Image (tube, rainbow, N blue to C red):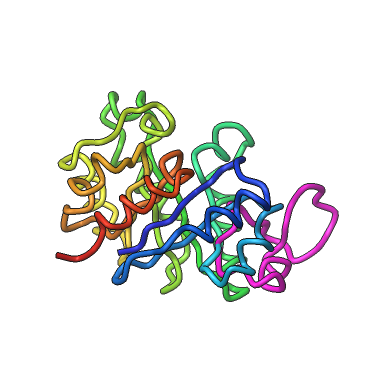
C-alpha cells in the first residue's frame, strides 16, 4: 500500500519539520509526503520520501514560476504529483500538459503520481469511463508511474465515492493500464479502511486529512495489510 500526503498550499518549513518529527509511518506501508515547493528542502532533510506537487516538462528555460525535473532531483526529491484536479481547474492544466510533465519527470528518474478523475457533471452524464479512458490514454507506461483516481466532485467537498464506486473506477483504470491506482477524494480516518479494503485499491492520495499528524497516522494504519 502507498499512502501519499498532498499538503497543497499549507505548512511552511517550520510546520513541515514539526510534523515529520512527530510522524512515525507504520511498518508495511509506503508513505510519500508532498509539501509545498518552499518546504521541500526541509522535508528532504528528514530522510522521508518526498514528492513535489508539480513539475515542469523542460529542464530549464523562460518558464517563470515553474520548477524543473533536474531541480527536484538536485534537491533530493523522489518524485512529483502531476495533473491534480486543482491544477486542471485553476491553472489550465490539460491532459496533454499532464502527460508532458509525467514524461519529463520519469525521464529524469523521478516517480510520478498522475491524477485522473471526472467532474460531477461528467459522472451524471454517464461519461466517467470516457473521461478516464482519455486521461489515462495519454500517460506514459512506466514502472515508476502511479495513477491517483480522484473524482473531482469529491475533492475538498466532504463527499467521497462509496467503496463500490471506487472499486468500479479503479478496476476500469486497471483494464487500461497495468499500474498501481490510489484513491484520492476526501479520504479520512473514518472511511479509509473501507476504501482501502477494496481489492482494486493500492493506496490513497490524502489531502486535508493529511495535515494533522494523528489523522494521517490513522489513515496509514488503516492501510496495514491484514
Can you give x and y, in whole percent of width and height, for residue 165 in the image?
20, 39
Can you give x and y, in whole percent of width and height, for residue 20 in the image?
53, 59
Q: Quadrant of the N terminus?
A: bottom left
Occupied quadrant, residue 109: bottom right
**Residue sitting nearer the eye, 133 or 113:** 113
Q: Quadrant of the C terminus?
A: bottom left
Can you give x and y, in whole percent of width and height, for residue 116 in the image?
41, 46
Instruction: Please name the residue shown 17% across and 46% down the image.
Output: 194
Number of marks in the image?
0
Occupied quadrant, residue 121: top left
**Magenta region, mostly helix, strand or loop?**
loop
- Left or right: 172 as drawn, with respect to 156: left
Instruction: Please name the residue shown 36% across and 47% down the image.
Output: 149
- Left or right: 166 as drawn, with respect to 76: left
The residue positioned farthest toward the right in the image shown: 62
Instruction: Please name the residue shown 31% across and 33% down the image.
Output: 127
- Left or right: 71 as drawn, with respect to 113: right
**Residue sitting nearer the eye, 180 or 175:** 180
Q: Is 109 located above or below residue 225 in the figure?
A: below
Look at the image and say whether residue 72 sits in the magenta stretch.
yes
Q: Which segment is the magenta one?
A: 51-79
Q: Is 185 located above or below residue 54 in the figure?
A: above
Amino acid at each position: 500500500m502507498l499512502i501519499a500526503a498532498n499538503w497543497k498550499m499549507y505548512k511552511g518549513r517550520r510546520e513541515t519539520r514539526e510534523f515529520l518529527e512527530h510522524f512515525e509511518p507504520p511498518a508495511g506501508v509506503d508513505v510519500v509526503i508532498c509539501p509545498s515547493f518552499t518546504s521541500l528542502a526541509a522535508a528532504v532533510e528528514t530522510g522521508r520520501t518526498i514528492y513535489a506537487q508539480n513539475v515542469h516538462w523542460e529542464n530549464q528555460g523562460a518558464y517563470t514560476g515553474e520548477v524543473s525535473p533536474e531541480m527536484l532531483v538536485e534537491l533530493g526529491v523522489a518524485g512529483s504529483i502531476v495533473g491534480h484536479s486543482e491544477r486542471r481547474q485553476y491553472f489550465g492544466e490539460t491532459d496533454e500538459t499532464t502527460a508532458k510533465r509525467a514524461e519529463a519527470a520519469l525521464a529524469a528518474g523521478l516517480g510520478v503520481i498522475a491524477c485522473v478523475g471526472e467532474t460531477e457533471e461528467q459522472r451524471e452524464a454517464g461519461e466517467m469511463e470516457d473521461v478516464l479512458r482519455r486521461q489515462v490514454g495519454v500517460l506514459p507506461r512506466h514502472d515508476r508511474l502511479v495513477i491517483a483516481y480522484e473524482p473531482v466532485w469529491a475533492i475538498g467537498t466532504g463527499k467521497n465515492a462509496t467503496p463500490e464506486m471506487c472499486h468500479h473506477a479503479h478496476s476500469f483504470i486497471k483494464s487500461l493500464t497495468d499500474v498501481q491506482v490510489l484513491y484520492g477524494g476526501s479520504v479520512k480516518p473514518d472511511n479509509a479502511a473501507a476504501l482501502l479494503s477494496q481489492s482494486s485499491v493500492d493506496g490513497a492520495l490524502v489531502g486535508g486529512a493529511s495535515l494533522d499528524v494523528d489523522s494521517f497516522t490513522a489513515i496509514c494504519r488503516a492501510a496495514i495489510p491484514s
